[in-house]
Image: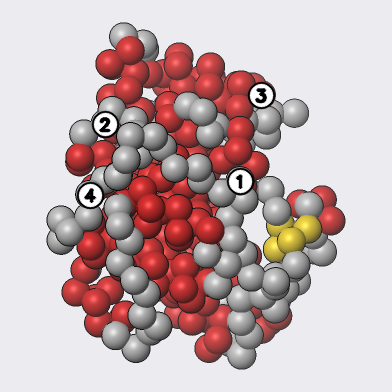
Amino acid sequence: MMENVDAESEECISVEKPASLEEGARAIVAEADTARKVELAYATSRAWFRRELSLRRGSGPLAMPDRPGRPDKPVLLPPRDMPRRSVGGEAGRIALVHSLAHIELNAVDLTWDLIGRFAHAKMPRSYFDDWVQVGLEEAKHFSLLERRLEDLDSHYGALPAHDGLWQAAQATGHDLAARLAIIPLVLEARGLDITPGMIEKSGALGDTQTASILEIIYRDEKRHVAFGAKWFRYICDRQGLKPESRFQQLVRTHFKGGLKPPFNDRARSEAGLTPGFYRPLVRLVG
Ligand SMILES: [Fe+2]
Ligand SMILES: [Fe+2]
């Protein structure tokens, strides 16, 4: 996959290699231009996997931006002010792909924020490898959807987008276990529940190109949830805590929305997120 990224990057703008993984992560989150943000994510991942980057420099952590850099458009609205999305025809396709692109752009920032904010956590190198891989794949997902919007004669920024996702990051900025519980194990796991239906629907409406992008995203996201489950268990084991009950405690504290069935139990379990983690949280709904 790294070769693909290399090939794709050749036509793109060039960016400087960061001084450390931590600095690279901060630059990615801070960057407002989406093309540069993606390119920085590719360059940082490439340098990390070639073992050309140190994890961090200096003794103290770098301050991460409070909010990610974003372009002027799309206009960001509170979720309740979002216009109802058209579902049919070309406008419906564009609205769906636009909202997915926005989610993936948030995923880019959330993942690199995780890498940068917790670069001083005492975690093995393979932990950082896993999240750099995720950060690279989120940038790829955004690019695929952005290109799809262009094929549909639109672009990212053409429609308003909602402003709710970053709040999850702010609420868990102090605690790595809380961050892993909320981002991969609640939000990305939710993606596993709803993506198969979207793939089917896009295919049924004849939009096979969007369906194949969603297939790629679904395959990658299963691994992201698996990384979340693995490292969440690792931290709980180290602290002598039972992962299921710790997860439930953290979700009750940091995630207000409640968990909504139906769950894709099979995909979740394949990723190591077995029902004992999330079933007891269903009663939060309502
Ligand atoms: Fe993604
Ligand atoms: Fe993901």
Task: Classify mark 1 as within 8 Å of ligand 2 or not, answering yes or no.
Answer: no
Going 53% across and 88% down the picture, which residue do you hit?
151
Q: Residues within 10 Å of mark 1 (few under 14, many from 20)?
A: few
Residue 87 x %, y %:
71, 70
Q: Is residue 158 above or below residue 105?
A: below
The answer to whether mark 2 is within 8 Å of ligand 2 is no
Badge 3 marks a residue whose secondary structure is helix
* Quadrant position of the C terminus in the picture: top right
Query: At label 1, which amino acid type do we have?
Result: Asp
Q: Kindly indicate whether the residue at mark 3 contacts the one at mark 1 (C-beta within 8 angstroms).
A: no
Residue 199 visible: yes
Indicate which disc residue 54 carries.
Answer: 4
Contact, mark 2 vs mark 3 (Cβ under 8 Å): no
Mark 2 to mark 1 CA distance (whole Å): 24 Å
Q: Is residue 121 left or right of residue 36?
A: left
Q: Is residue 213 visible?
A: no
Q: Residue at x 28, y 16 (%)?
A: 237
Q: Which residue is mark 1?
A: 66
Residue 3, which numbered label? none
The residue beneath circle 2 is 123
* Distance Cα–Cα, label 1 vs label 4: 24 Å
Q: In the figure, 150 relative to 233: above or below?
A: below
| Viewer-nearest residue: 244 or 160 | 160
Q: Quadrant of the N terminus?
A: bottom left
Q: Nearer the viewer, mark 1 or mark 3?
A: 1
Query: Mark 2 or 3, which is nearer the eye?
Result: 2
| Residue 86 at x, y percent in the picture | 75, 71
